[in-house]
Image (tube, rainbow, N blue to C red):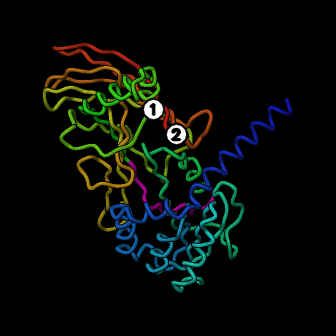
């Protein structure tokens, strides 16, 4: 019993260490900083709303190399507290110093859920900045930690940046990718490995989807108010109804999201839709084993559930149920996907 408990604790420790260590490498921060859509949105949301930041205490959760902390300090914050668990914070300290903000930005190396006090005797903050969104929105499972930090450290009249999230689903024609998977495993250096396709089918993957591949409308699965959402509301089974915009085939579903800063005079919205400028989040693609032949105005109904993996809470399990009754075919199915 004790041995099993220790094994579980060691597994959790290893998982946690791996997650934080992955953010210690400069390459991941370089990729994030090169995402101009992402950085510009935060920059504009902060610098165009100096009146919200002047003289305020700001908590930057998962501060990384400190770019948002620097924006907040430049916008007139009284103090910015940057919290990050990875070793990159050593470089962040140097970045803050080199740019002359050591008096305004204080850094703490700690998981936010283990932080027991703030510097300078501060008990509550006015603003929380946190870019918690991952692939398929929930990858890395940071939202529960953000809710914990909000309830513990944010003032009753405090605000979040960003503060609104929307999650969407759509259906696409993706014959090239689907056929490539089948054909690739049929003949690998002269050997039949087609059984491998079944494993590939049950993995979610991320990629850029061309707008021309979209077959249906976008359906709003879920709206999240980050200032009010409760922990028990994070995981839900959300219904969708997708209407065909043209006669075509459906080979996959895609999931994407938008996030908004609505506290300023001019709301700022970033979308990860195929119709929007590309971001590092891309779109999350769920290939299905069925080929749905759909006609304009016909509908696919279903449910989507996204939850943390049982073996590693940073990873995802995605469950999609879908039903279609059309002129050309009928389909009813349920698929489980993993995303590592």
Q: SS of the residue at dot 2? A: loop
Q: Is residue 144 above or below residue 60?
A: above
Q: Which residues are magenta?
A: 152-165
| Nearer-the-camera pick, 159 or 191 | 191
Q: Is residue 48 left or right of residue 162?
A: left
Crowd around label 1: few <14 · some 14–19 · many ≥20 (10 Å): some
| Nearer-the-camera pick, 53 or 157 | 53
Q: Where residue 154 sits in the image (x, y, percent)? A: 57, 61
Name the residue tied to disc 2.
340
Q: Distance of mark 1 from mark 2, alpha carbons?
A: 8 Å
Name the residue tied to disc 1.
203
Residue at image x 47%, y 71%? 67
| Nearer-the-camera pick, 301 or 186 | 186
For residue 35, which quarter of the picture? bottom left
Q: Main secondary structure of the magenta part?
A: strand
Q: Quadrant of the N terminus?
A: top right
Q: Is residue 3 left or right of residue 46?
A: right
């Amino acid at each position: 019993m004790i041995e099993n408990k220790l094994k579980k604790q060691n597994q959790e420790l290893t998982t946690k260490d791996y997650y934080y260590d992955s953010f210690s490498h400069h390459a991941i921060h370089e990729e994030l900083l090169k995402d101009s859509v992402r950085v510009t949105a935060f920059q504009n949301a902060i610098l165009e709303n100096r009146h919200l930041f002047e003289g305020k205490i700001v908590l930057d959760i998962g501060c990384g190399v400190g770019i948002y902390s620097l924006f907040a300090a430049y916008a007139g914050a009284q103090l910015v507290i940057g919290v990050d668990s990875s070793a990159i914070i050593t470089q962040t300290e140097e970045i803050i110093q080199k740019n002359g903000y050591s008096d305004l930005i204080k850094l703490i190396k700690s998981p936010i859920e283990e932080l027991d006090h703030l510097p300078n005797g501060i008990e509550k903050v006015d603003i929380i900045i946190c870019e918690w969104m991952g692939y398929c929105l929930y990858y890395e499972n940071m939202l529960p930690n953000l809710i914990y930090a909000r309830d513990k450290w944010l003032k009753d009249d405090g605000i979040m940046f960003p503060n609104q999230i929307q999650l969407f689903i759509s259906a696409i024609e993706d014959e090239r990718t689907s056929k490539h998977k089948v054909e690739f495993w049929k003949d690998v250096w002269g050997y039949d490995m087609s059984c491998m396709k079944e494993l590939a089918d049950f993995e979610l993957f991320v990629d850029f989807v061309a707008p021309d591949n979209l077959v249906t409308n976008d359906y709003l699965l879920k709206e999240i108010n980050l200032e009010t959402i409760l922990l028990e509301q994070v995981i839900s089974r959300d219904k969708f109804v997708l209407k065909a915009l043209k006669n075509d085939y459906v080979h996959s579903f895609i999931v994407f999201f938008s996030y908004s800063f609505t506290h300023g005079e001019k709301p700022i919205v970033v979308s990860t839709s195929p119709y929007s400028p590309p971001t590092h989040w891309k779109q999350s693609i769920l290939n299905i084993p069925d080929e749905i032949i759909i006609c304009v105005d016909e509908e696919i109904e279903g449910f989507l559930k996204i939850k943390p993996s049982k073996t590693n809470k940073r990873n995802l399990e995605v469950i999609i149920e879908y039903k279609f009754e059309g002129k050309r075919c009928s389909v009813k199915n349920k698929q489980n996907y993993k995303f590592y």
